Each structure stands twice: as C-alpha cells, then as structure tokens.
C-alpha cells in the first residue's frame, strides 16, 4: 500500500502520493515542491479523519472539491521550463519559446528548437539506457512542457524498452481500437506496405480525443521509413487559440464539442487496416468506443502550464454540444482551418531510429502520406491523460505567478 502525505492550510487541501511509481502528478511533486509545500501547508495524518471527503483525482494527485489546489501551484516554486510558460499566460507562446530558447535551460540535455512556435531536437540522451537518471527524465519532461514536441535522433528501442520509457513519464493508455503487438500489447505498430493505401493519421488530430480522458502524450518510434517523404507535421494549439479574436475566444469558452471515434474508425470505410482480416498489417477491434461519444470544452486549460489551447480536431470532433451538425459546421470548419497554419507548425523528417514525444493536450499532428512506394513502420505508445477542463479567468488572462491554487472547482468546465 502506497503512503500518502496530506498537506493542508486553512482553506486548501492537497493529497500527495509518495509512491515510487512515476505518475505525471508525482513528476511535478518533486523534492523542491515538497519542501515548498511543507512551508505553506501543514502535513496532516491521513488517518485522523481530517483528510476525508477528498474528491476528484489526476492519477495519484487528489484535490478536495472546495478550495482546490491546482497543479500549477507546483510550477510557482519550480525553476523548470514549465514555470516559464505558466507565469504569465498573456504572453504569446511563440514569444516565450523564442525567449527561453536563447537561455541555458538545462543541465543534463541539449535542446535545439525546431521553430519559434514549437518543437525541439534533444541530444545527449540514450532513451534505451537503464541508467537514464531521474534528473534527465525531469529535464526531458520540462522540455516536453516547454516545446510541446521533442525529437530524439538515433535511438534503438525494442517494444519492451519503449514501454519502459513511457512508464518513466506516466501511466500507459492502451489503444481501445487498434490492436497492439502480440509481444507487447501496449505498443501499436503502424504499418504501411509499399504500394498499399492507408489513411491512418492523415488528418489533423489529437490522439484519442474521443475518450473521456484523452491521451496526455504519445511516444512514436520510427522503425523503417522511406528515403524521402511521409513526414509528420505538428501544430501548436496554444498558438491557434491565441490567434483568434478576443470576441471569438470568449464565445468558444462557453462551448463544448462532441468527439467520437465512430467515423475515423468506421469499419465500412477504414483504409490500410481491417476489423476482420487477421493478416492485415493494422488490425482493429470493434470496441465500445466506436459507438460512444465524449464531450469536451472547445478551449481547454493545460493542467501543468495553465495555458489555454484549442481542443477540437477534424478527425474526431463532429459537432458542438446543443447544435446540429449543420449548425455547427461553419464554426468548426473555421476552427479546423486555423490548425496547421504555417507559422504555427513544425515538420519533422523521419530517419530510422528516431523517437518523437509530444503533448496531445496542446498540439495536433498529421501524418503526410505522400510516399506510397516505400514501406513505413512506426511504433506508438500513448500516456493516459486526465479529463479536459477550462479554468475560468479572473484576472484578464493572467495567472498570478502561474498559481491557480485559489480556484474553486465550480470555476472549471468539465
């Protein structure tokens, strides 16, 4: 049974797991944060009755419904790059990333930005090494929050090593529809044979947004790639939201949208895989997610940076809650058209052995299927996320010091 430390003040309660397992909550709750919490909050015996009535959870982190302490509390006491993003959300994300890119942000890794808006190549790291230290993992996660998507060249990971790497960053989210590899079910192998048609991932999307708790992030490993083509593009959802007019931002913040997998994975139209053929390169299963729907805020607050991001995509979002598809279409089509604008994107040219790790909470991506004459094999693992929410601003877009600790749960849109 894992131990718990329960910190409290007069109006705030925070339950912190001290489990050795690295969940995304315990990643933020590092020794520096624990020291900070110990000065601001008094540890309380979990068994003395004062810690009862805790409601809501993000992995190991549990937040009392009234007087909630949000994850951004951690960022206020941290010098990690995530804190830079959280301190003043009124500053455009591209400006912040350009500013931080010129500084020496890391001690154990080297990060080279790909564009001013998002993405960085990380060097000096062997992701397969069992000796990968916690300090390195912390810095990788900080870079992940800062740049949105990270690229690692010349990595060689077995399916088991890829799963092991994923578990350093969080809990694995097994794909409900695409069948995993026989030897490692948490890994899906995306195969496009030479000359074969496919449409897997070839529309802008955020992985598994049709789930009640969409994937936090994805880890994609290139096994075999063409000599040219079949790149992947990424688009910054922070930047998309920030580029909208204040009037449209305000309108969207009162709306939610419906997401479903039923159309993207329609058994009658799926290309490049099969629900029935056991010999197909990509095999699907008729899961309940093909029939279900999830409703998410159109604008979501990133739980670790406090920034707002547009959270609708042309692959899984079907309509706006309370509207018909016809009524929803003009607005959604406009929002879809704002994803992938050149100044919001980066494009990655794969080589065998490359690894990309991206944050599904604040970006979208698309596979470019422009080379069908060569075989392409990729392996993907996804990390379990939390339920999207919108934090209502009370300070004209600014989070004082990145702290959302005084927010009440009724100020969140779930």
Image (tube, rainbow, N blue to C red):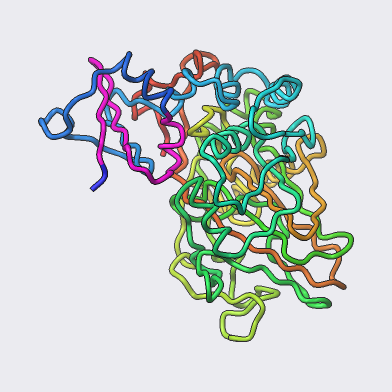
Examine the structure image and report whether residue 11 is included in the region drawn in magenta: yes
How many numbered circles are shown?
0
> Which residue is found at the position 85% from the left and 71% from the top?
374
Furthest residue to the left?
A: 48
Left or right, 394 with reference to 220? left
Left or right, 347 with reference to 135? right
Q: Position of residue 82 (x, y in %)?
A: 57, 27
Q: Position of residue 146 (x, y in %)?
A: 63, 31
Determine which quarter of the picture holds residue 403: top left
Q: Position of residue 1 (x, y in %)?
A: 23, 48
> Is 170 placed above or below 237 here?
below
- Report the front residue among 407 and 335: 407
> Which residue is found at the position 66% from the left and 24% from the top?
105
> Is 168 placed above or below 269 here?
above
The reply to whether residue 120 is in sight is yes
- Report the front residue among 187 and 197: 187
> Is 131 placed above or below 231 here?
above
The reply to whether residue 295 is in sight is no
Left or right, 5 with reference to 121? left
Q: Position of residue 204 (x, y in %)?
A: 69, 52
> Is 406 placed above or below 156 here?
above
> Which residue is found at the position 47% from the left and 51% from the top?
384
- Report the front residue among 50 and 284: 50
Q: Which region of the structure is painted magenta?
A: 3-30
Q: Quadrant of the C terminus?
A: top left
Furthest residue to the front?
A: 131
Determine which quarter of the picture holds residue 236: top right
Examine the structure image and report whether residue 359 is included in the region drawn in magenta: no
């Amino acid at each position: 049974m894992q131990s718990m430390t329960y910190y409290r003040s007069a109006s705030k309660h925070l339950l912190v797991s001290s489990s050795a397992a690295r969940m995304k909550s315990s990643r933020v709750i590092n020794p520096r944060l624990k020291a900070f919490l110990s000065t601001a909050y008094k540890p309380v015996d979990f068994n003395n009755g004062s810690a009862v009535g805790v409601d809501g959870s993000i992995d190991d982190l549990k937040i009392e419904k009234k007087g909630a302490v949000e994850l951004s509390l951690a960022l206020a006491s941290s010098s990690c790059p995530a804190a830079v993003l959280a301190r003043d959300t009124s500053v455009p994300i591209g400006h912040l990333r350009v500013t931080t890119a010129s500084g020496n942000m890391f001690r154990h890794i080297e990060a080279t930005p790909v564009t001013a808006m998002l993405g960085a190549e990380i060097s000096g790291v062997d992701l397969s090494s069992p000796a990968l230290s916690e300090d390195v993992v912390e810095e990788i996660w900080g870079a992940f929050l800062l740049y949105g998507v990270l690229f690692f060249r010349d990595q060689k990971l077995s399916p088991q090593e890829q799963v092991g790497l994923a578990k350093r960053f969080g809990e694995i989210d097994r794909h409900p529809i695409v069948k995993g590899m026989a030897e490692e079910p948490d890994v899906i192998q995306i195969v496009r044979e030479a000359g074969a048609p496919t449409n897997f991932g070839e529309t802008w999307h955020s992985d598994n947004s049709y789930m009640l708790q969409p994937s936090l992030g994805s880890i994609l490993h290139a096994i075999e790639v063409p000599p040219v083509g079949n790149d992947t593009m990424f688009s910054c959802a922070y930047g998309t939201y920030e580029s909208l007019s204040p009037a449209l931002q305000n309108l969207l913040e009162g709306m939610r949208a419906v997401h479903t997998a039923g159309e993207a994975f329609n058994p009658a139209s799926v290309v490049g895989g099969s629900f029935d053929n056991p010999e197909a390169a990509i095999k699907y299963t008729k899961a309940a997610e093909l029939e279900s729907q999830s409703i998410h805020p159109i604008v979501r607050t990133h739980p670790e940076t406090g920034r707002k991001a547009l959270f609708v995509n042309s692959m899984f979002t079907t309509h706006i809650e309370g509207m018909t598809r016809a009524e929803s279409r003009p607005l959604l089509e406009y929002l879809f058209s704002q994803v992938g604008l050149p100044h919001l994107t980066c494009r990655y040219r794969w080589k065998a052995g490359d690894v990309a790790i991206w944050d599904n909470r604040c970006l979208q991506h698309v596979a470019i299927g422009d080379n069908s004459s060569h075989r392409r094999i990729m392996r993907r693992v996804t990390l379990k996320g939390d339920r999207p929410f919108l934090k209502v601003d009370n300070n004209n877009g600014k989070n004082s010091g990145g702290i959302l600790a005084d927010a009440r749960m009724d100020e969140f849109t779930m």
